[in-house]
Image: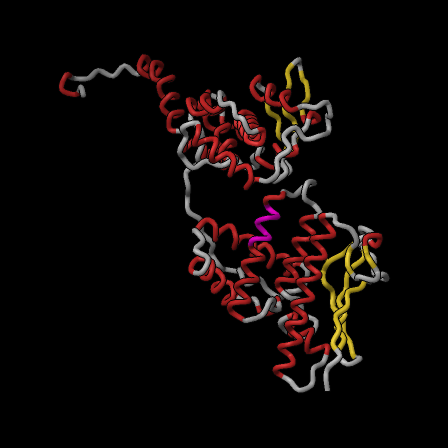
């Protein structure tokens, strides 16, 4: 007899969330019997289409959630096919177990990761950055691909994620995906965060990363030297998009703001104290306050794009990756053939613009919004010229104070 199999998404109206949104549930039906599980997604009830069982409209949120629902639908159907192959009688509970990848009622790793990403995305622009969201998405996609290749399924239970799984995934990133040491370190740190979150929510008994050592390699901070920065500031481009990216990059060089902070910067982030202008904002990454004197160069760049709306972002940038692609060509045309990214502008502010000009490291740390001065000290180590100039500055005082007689044979 042919099985009557159905997958249905519905809203759980009796358990409205604090945000006012309703959880989206998935119901599996096999021959009149059914069971349900949470998709870990939620929606504003006004956007829900009762007939299509999807979100209405073509907004970014509608497309994103509908795509996730489609992915869940395909994964549940795949679990149903697997259940058909392994048993004569298929139950909705067996399909649910197959989808979740473990015991009944357990939560899948990819499902939980998608829930985290959905929650994270809702905070982008408030206290979360889009670039960090992309990082979590990359890691989630890598985990999904690894699970497909290793287990021939799209998800596994969180209970199945143990020390062996962590080690094998780490090795897979290196061998199959050819990731570098620091890239793997970044990805595994993100994966570790998801596991800690699962433990804190009571979904996992212990953290599989406990005692697992993650290491990164030291890399030199790339920044523009004084002459390179001067040459780049004189460049004029025919493409408005490339000019925008270059001007935003230069603005970061003279203010120290990161890509995400430059992207949200507006005239409301400028204050006037004692007749002088300051960039006064909070870092999106850490929430720490930033207070930087507004120099003439960045002020001119602001006025170049200011349209009279104090709340609107001055530099309307698409994405960090897009900016880096345009910036690469611009730097090459300016005769700068080293590998630099948009974040190199922040390094340039810390080294060439401030430390190399005698600004105390404590002040630089405060302007960069660092929570630990040790982070700023990395730039001081990189900038060897600052060490030389400081020693030249104090050499006369030392030589005049410590007058040690020497023999002719001691002279170099």
Residue 177 visible to the viewer: yes
Quadrant of image for the C terminus: top left
Q: Residue at x 56, y 26 (%)?
A: 247
User: For this view, does 349 lie left or right of residue 74?
Assistant: left
Specify whether residue 218 is painted magenta: no
Observer-nearest residue: 27 or 120? 27
Seen in the picture, residue 94 relative to 323 is either above or below; the reply is: below
Which residue is rendered at x = 76% and y = 56% of the image? 42
| Quarter assignment of residue 196 | bottom right
Instruction: Count the labels in the image.
Output: 0
Q: Position of residue 155 (x, y in %)?
A: 61, 67
Q: Residue at x 64, y 85 (%)?
A: 87
Furthest toward the front, the residue is: 238
Which residue is the extreme one toward the left?
Answer: 409
Left or right: 412 as drawn, with respect to 328: left
Residue 18 picture location, percent across and down? 81, 52
Q: Position of residue 271 (x, y in %)?
A: 68, 21
Magenta stretch encompasses residue 136: yes
Horizontal arrangement in the rendering, residue 24 relative to residue 158 (left or right): right
Left or right, residue 17 beside residue 252: right
Q: Which residue sits at x=14%, y=16%?
A: 408
Q: Main secondary structure of the magenta part?
A: helix
Residue 252 shows in this picture: no
Quadrant assignment for the N terminus: bottom right
Above or below, 119 relative to 321: below
| The furthest residue to the right | 14
- Colour convention: secondary structure
Residue 234 drawn at (x, y percent): 49, 20
The region drawn magenta spans: 132-138
Looking at the picture, tell me which residue is in the foreground, 243 or 228.
243
């Amino acid at each position: 007899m042919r099985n009557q199999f159905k997958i249905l998404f519905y809203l759980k109206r009796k358990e409205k969330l604090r945000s006012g949104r309703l959880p989206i549930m998935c119901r599996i039906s096999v021959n009149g019997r059914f069971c349900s599980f949470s998709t870990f997604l939620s929606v504003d009830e006004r956007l829900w289409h009762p007939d299509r069982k999807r979100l209405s409209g073509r907004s970014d949120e509608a497309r994103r959630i509908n795509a996730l629902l489609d992915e869940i639908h395909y994964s549940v159907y795949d679990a149903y096919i697997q259940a058909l192959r392994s048993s004569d009688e298929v139950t909705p509970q067996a399909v649910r177990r197959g989808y979740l990848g473990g015991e009944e009622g357990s939560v899948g790793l990819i499902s939980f990761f998608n829930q985290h990403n959905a929650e994270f995305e809702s905070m982008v622009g408030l206290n979360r950055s889009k670039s960090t969201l992309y990082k979590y998405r990359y890691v989630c996609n890598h985990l999904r691909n690894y699970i497909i290749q290793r287990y021939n399924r799209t998800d596994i239970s969180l209970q199945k994620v143990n020390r062996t799984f962590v080690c094998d995934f780490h090795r897979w990133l290196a061998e199959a995906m050819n990731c570098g040491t620091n890239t793997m370190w970044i990805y595994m740190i993100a994966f570790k965060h998801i596991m800690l979150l699962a433990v804190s929510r009571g979904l996992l008994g212990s953290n599989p990363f406990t005692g697992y050592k993650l290491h990164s390699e030291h890399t030199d901070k790339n920044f523009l030297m004084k002459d390179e920065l001067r040459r780049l500031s004189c460049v004029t481009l025919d493409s408005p998009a490339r000019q925008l990216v270059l001007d935003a990059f230069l603005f970061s060089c003279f203010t120290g703001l990161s890509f995400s902070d430059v992207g949200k910067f507006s005239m409301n982030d400028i204050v006037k104290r004692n007749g002088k202008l300051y960039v006064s904002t909070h870092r999106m990454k850490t929430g720490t306050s930033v207070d930087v004197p507004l120099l003439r160069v960045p002020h001119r760049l602001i006025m170049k794009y200011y349209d009279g709306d104090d709340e609107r972002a001055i530099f309307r940038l698409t994405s960090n990756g897009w900016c880096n692609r345009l910036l690469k060509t611009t730097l090459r045309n300016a005769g700068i053939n080293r590998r630099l990214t948009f974040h190199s502008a922040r390094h340039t502010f810390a080294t060439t613009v401030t430390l190399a000009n005698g600004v105390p490291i404590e002040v630089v740390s405060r302007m960069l919004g660092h929570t630990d001065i040790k982070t700023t000290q990395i730039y001081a180590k990189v900038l060897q010229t600052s060490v030389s100039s400081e020693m030249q500055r104090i050499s006369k005082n030392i030589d005049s104070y410590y007058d040690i007689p020497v023999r002719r044979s001691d002279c170099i």
